[in-house]
Image: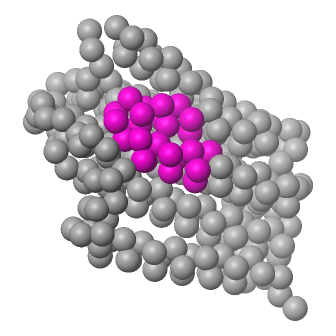
């Protein structure tokens, strides 16, 4: 039995569901960002696996995975800067306590 | 056979720390558990002959993003203690959504006929990725670098301490 495309897709969908659970249930904004990173990783596994098994002549999946990694770094930087700004003015990082529009 | 064994080991290396990430009450432990998850994904990339993506994954995810998350945890004390409630009231909803999505995906994925093709990847994928970035995908490359610049400036402006 060799490893096929479906194996990778199964692992990446489980990873995506774990990230979704973290995003839906965590209170800490940093933990929510960690869940988003897990979901982005699951998407990247899909891109690279499809590139290997469906279109192996091109490197389109690699290109898109690299772009997604770059945008994930941007998203982490901006998201964590927002968490720091919210913590400085509201003294909390729990997203269910950040419920005022203006301080 | 060796490929299957490597796949199973890497799956465990990805999914067990990912469970710790989503379930641990200790936020620092959750952040450090991201590292084996990212390294397991790197192993997947190597198995899929994407060596350049694997290198970038180690540098950016396992290196930069984890360190960034740990720094922000350090700078925003107060919400991170183990005695603080870490989950909101949506736990039943979250469990339902995640389990149903996993169930549906695991039901659909093995039955879908993917248009597989038996070709081979280029011998040196880093070279192919580099030349593709500078020919066919140059617009994506430029726009991504612009987004990176905007995110850099935006992060500095947002996180700066106001006088």
Name the spot of residue A93 as percent of width and height, x first.
Answer: 77, 60
Which residue is depicted at the point 28% across and 62% down?
Answer: B131
Query: Is residue B118 visible in this depiction of the protein?
Result: yes
The question of residue B79 being in magenta is answered with: no
Does residue A52 appear left or right of residue A71 in this picture? left
Which residue is depicted at the point 49% across and 37% down?
Answer: B42
The question of residue B42 being in magenta is answered with: yes
The quarter of the displayed image where residue A51 is located = top left
Query: Is residue A99 visible in this depiction of the protein?
Result: no
Image vertical order of residue A30 relative to residue A9, above or below: below
Which residue is depicted at the point 50% across and 51% down?
Answer: B56
Which residue is depicted at the point 41% across and 37% down?
Answer: B45
Does residue B53 appear left or right of residue B33 in this picture? left
Name the spot of residue B7 as percent of width and height, x first.
Answer: 42, 20
Does residue B36 appear left or right of residue A94 in this picture? left
Q: Residue furthest bottom?
A: B163
What is the span of residues highlighted in magenta in the rendered image?
A: B38-62
Q: Which quadrant of the rendered structure holds the N terminus of chain B? A: top left
Name the spot of residue B67 as percent of width and height, x first.
Answer: 72, 52
């Amino acid at each position: 039995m060799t490893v096929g495309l479906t194996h990778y897709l199964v692992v990446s969908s489980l990873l995506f569901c774990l990230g979704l659970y973290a995003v839906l249930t965590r209170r800490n904004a940093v933990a929510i960002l960690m869940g988003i990173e897990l979901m982005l990783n699951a998407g990247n596994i899909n891109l690279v696996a499809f590139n290997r098994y469906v279109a192996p002549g091109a490197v389109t999946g690699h290109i898109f995975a690299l772009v997604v990694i770059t945008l994930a770094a941007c998203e982490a930087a901006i998201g964590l800067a927002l968490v720091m700004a919210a913590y400085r003015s509201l003294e909390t990082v729990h997203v269910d306590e950040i419920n005022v529009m203006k301080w | 056979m060796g490929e299957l064994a490597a796949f199973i080991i890497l799956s465990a290396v990805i999914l067990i720390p990912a469970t710790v990430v989503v379930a641990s009450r200790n936020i620092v432990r959750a952040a450090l558990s991201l590292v084996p998850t990212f390294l397991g994904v790197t192993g997947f990339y190597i198995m899929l002959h994407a060596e350049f993506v694997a290198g970038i994954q180690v540098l950016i995810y396992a290196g930069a993003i984890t360190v960034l998350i740990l720094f922000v945890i350090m700078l925003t004390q107060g919400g991170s203690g183990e005695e603080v409630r870490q989950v909101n009231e949506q736990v039943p909803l979250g469990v339902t959504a995640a389990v149903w999505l996993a169930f549906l995906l695991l039901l659909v994925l093995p039955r879908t006929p993917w248009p597989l093709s038996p070709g081979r990847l280029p011998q040196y994928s880093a070279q192919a990725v580099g030349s593709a970035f500078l020919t066919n995908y140059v617009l994506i490359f430029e726009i991504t670098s612009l987004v990176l610049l905007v995110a850099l400036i935006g992060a500095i402006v947002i996180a700066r301490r106001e006088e």
